[in-house]
Every structure is written in structure tokens, then in C-alpha cells.
Image (tube, grey):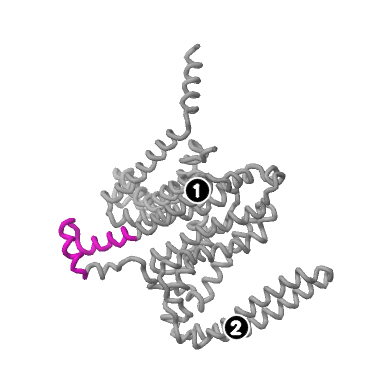
Amino acid sequence: MNRSSRNTSARHRIFSLPADWPAHRRNLVLACIMALMLSFVGFVQSWNLAFSLLNMCLISAIMSLGVNIQWGYAGLFNAGVMGFAALGGLAAVLLSMDPVPAAWAAGGGGIGLGLVIGFVTIYANIYLWKQARSQGKKRYWMIGLVIVVGYSLMRQAIDPSVAAIEAVDPAMTGYLGGLGLPIILSWLVGGLFAAAAAWVVGRIALGLRSDYLAIATLGISEIIIYVLKFEDWLTRGVKNVNGLPRPVPYEVDLQEAAWFQEIIPQFNLSIVEASSLLVKLCYSGLFLIVLLTIIWLSESALRGPWGRMMRAIRDNEVAANAMGKNVTSRHLQVFVLGSAVIGIAGAMLVTLDGQFTPTSYQPLRFTFLIWVMVIVGGSGNNWGAVLGGFVIWFFWIESEPIGLWLITLLTSGMEPAHWLRLHLIENAAHTRLITMGLVLLLTLRFAPRGLIPEVKR
């Protein structure tokens, strides 16, 4: 056997080893590298920034898991991640904020009446569609008439109430408020909101070609953002909702607590820095519990009969349909589940921020970036989606200071006031987009299946 044949045989032996332990070793190495990167930020910049990064990485990983459930399990392309995340944020407002009694007195009854009319209109149309099949084209005229009448009555009930609600102290409130419940409950409700929207979209679009689903999800997400921006009675619109309650202690309360003041000197930290670190650690613990729970449920489902069925449908819909599987129903199921996970992450993000800002929901941040996380991490692999969430968010935040340091280093030989040096330093923020492109290209070139590819079982 010549040298070339021996090398080929050796490579074949290396790559034909049992997949379990090399994959576990690789995953452990990648996780350690990610932990070292976060630790490096803590040592070089600050631990407050490192834990802020960690919290956002955890939330991004959960969003990435939601998209991976849809794309990696079933091959469904969701272009409306932004809208489902926004619905999770809306849940945090509607559940946790205190109600505004004056606004409810001014127009709460009219809003309730309008919603009842809207639901009755929808039910009447569904009933007519099923019962008037023998009427031919008359059915469409009847449904159109019901829609026009119902919409007119709904607007007559809602419009005066909306004007009255938004006139109630608009600088501070101008909306109905919420239910005053613990904000951690909104994480589950955010998942329900997103799941309900996904069910509506899926019922319409999943029976059609796959590109229709992308168009439908993109459209519904833009509609959701439009409503959140301009319906002040619901979310205060562009005036934002500030001061959402927390599931963790406030820094001021910790700084005033006697037990906290006693233990701080042992860690050689200022009381302000220590209180901020403890709050971030509390958030990290809560987010980690949610992440591990979703991973456990996802992995259990993926390794069971349901997961094998979903992969069979993804790989060959025609064959799965011939075996008696209801492909459209299963697609709807997995689409709803993935959207629910995205909604949970959206509620967690608003909880962490402490405010709801409808204008912050941009496709670049809440759709494109999440898809990059799934692609880089490895679609079809839950742990890959988690790693992708960590890696991409880390570079999304740290690429600007890294770029600024690199530009400063490369232009150190120039005059301090040189036009090229000043221009590059002023535009260091654009290195964020360049870095995302480089990470994506390098991953597609050297690891086309992602950093942690799907394991074929």
C-alpha cells in the first residue's frame, strides 16, 4: 500500500469512528472556548458586561432553539421571527403592568364590546363558510356582507373608546395597562400568544408551497409590529412602556440590605458593582433553567418516535404521506411549538430590559440574526442552535470594540489627526456587519453543516 492509500485509509478510519464520543468531545471543547471568550471579556472589560453578554446569549439561544425546531425538525422557513418575539414582549406588558383605572373607566367597556363584535363576526363567517356551501357564489357575497357590517359595528364601538383611553394622562399612561401579575407568568403567556398567531398563519399557509409560508410569516410579523407601534391604547405605541416589574431583586434594595453590606467587603467589590452582578446572576439562573428545560423537552421529543417521524417528513414528504402521515397537520404542530419557544424568549427579553419598545423590533436583529445563529450552530441539532446563539451574539456585541482595537493598532503609525485614521475609527461600528458576514462565510466554507452538525440516528 502506497503512502497516499495509507493516508486515505487513515482519514477514513478517523472519520468512521463511533460518532458519540468524538461529538461529545468536540461539543465540550467548543463550550469551553465559548466560556473562555466570556471570561476574557470579564477580565479585560468588566464582569458586569460579561454577565450582560451571558444573559443575552441565553435568550438568543432560546430564540435559536425555536427556529431550529421549525427549520431543523421540519424544514419550515419562518421569516417572521420578529413578530413572534414581539408578541412575547406584549404579553409581559399585558400581564405585569398595573391596570390604569381611569383608562378602564373611560373606554374599557367600549374596547370589550368591540372585541366581542369582532369575535362574533369571525365565528359568523366560519359558520357561513361551512353551512352555505350549496349557495355557490352567493356564499362569498354573504361572507363579504357580514365582514363589512361586523367591522363597521366594531369600529363604532372601539374608536371613541380608543380616543378616550389615549387622552388619560398620555405622558404617563394613555393605555389600559395590564393585570398586575408576576412578570414571570408572562413568559408562558408570551409563548401562548405566539403559538396562537402561528396557528392562524399555519392554518392558512402550511397547506400551500413552502415559499408562501415565508411570505405569510413576514407579512404577519410586519402587521404585528405596526399594531404595536400605533395602537397606543394597548402598548403606548412609540412612547414605550417603562418600569416593568422584575422577577429578581432591585439593586437599590440590595445596597440597603444589611446582610449584603456585610458580605461585600469579602469580595473586594464596590457595593454598586456587587449589587449589579448579583442581579445579573439571578437573571442568568432563571434563564438557564428555562433554556435547560426547553432543551430537555426538545431532545426527548427529537429522540422519540415523534422526532423520527418529523425527520422523515422533512427528508421526504411524499414518502411520509404515502405511509399515512398527515404532513400538513404535523407541520402545523411543529410550527406552533417553535413559535411558542420564540414567544417565551421575547417575553424574557422584555423582562431583562425592563421596558417594551415596539420600534426596537427590526428584521436584522430579530429575524436575520436568529437565522445566522441556527446556520452557524448547526440546524437540526439543539446543542448546535444553543452554541450558535452564544457565538453570534458574542461577536454581534464584541465586534465593535474588537474592530476599534484592531483599527487603532493598524493605524498607530499614522498621525493622530490623519483623515484616514479618523475615518476608520468613526466607522468602527460597521465592523459588526462585516464580522457577521465573515463568521457566516467561514462557517459555510469549513463547516457547512454548522459547528455542531445534526447527528444522523
* Position of 439 relative to 199 (above/below): above
* Position of 455 relative to 148 (above/below): above
Asked whether residue 299 is in view, the answer is yes
Provide the secondary structure element on which disc 1 rests. Answer: helix
Q: Position of residue 176 (x, y in %)?
A: 48, 80
Residue located farthest toward the front when viewing the structure as drawn: 305
Q: Give the extent of the magenta segment.
A: 256-282
Sooner in the amino-acid sequence: mark 2 or mark 1: 2
Report the residue at 49% width, 41% height from top.
450
Q: Nearer the viewer, residue 412 or 357?
A: 357
> Which residue is labeled 1 in the image?
300
Q: In this view, does 124 lie to the left or right of 45?
A: right
**Residue 156 picture quarter:** bottom right
Report the residue at 48% width, 55% height from top.
63
Provide the secondary structure element on which disc 2 rests. Answer: helix
At label 1, which amino acid type do we have?
A: Ser
> Which residue is labeled 2 in the image?
113
Q: Is the magenta stretch mostly helix, strand or loop?
A: helix
At label 2, which amino acid type do we have?
A: Leu
Is 269 part of what is drawn in magenta? yes
Q: Position of residue 99 (x, y in %)?
A: 44, 80
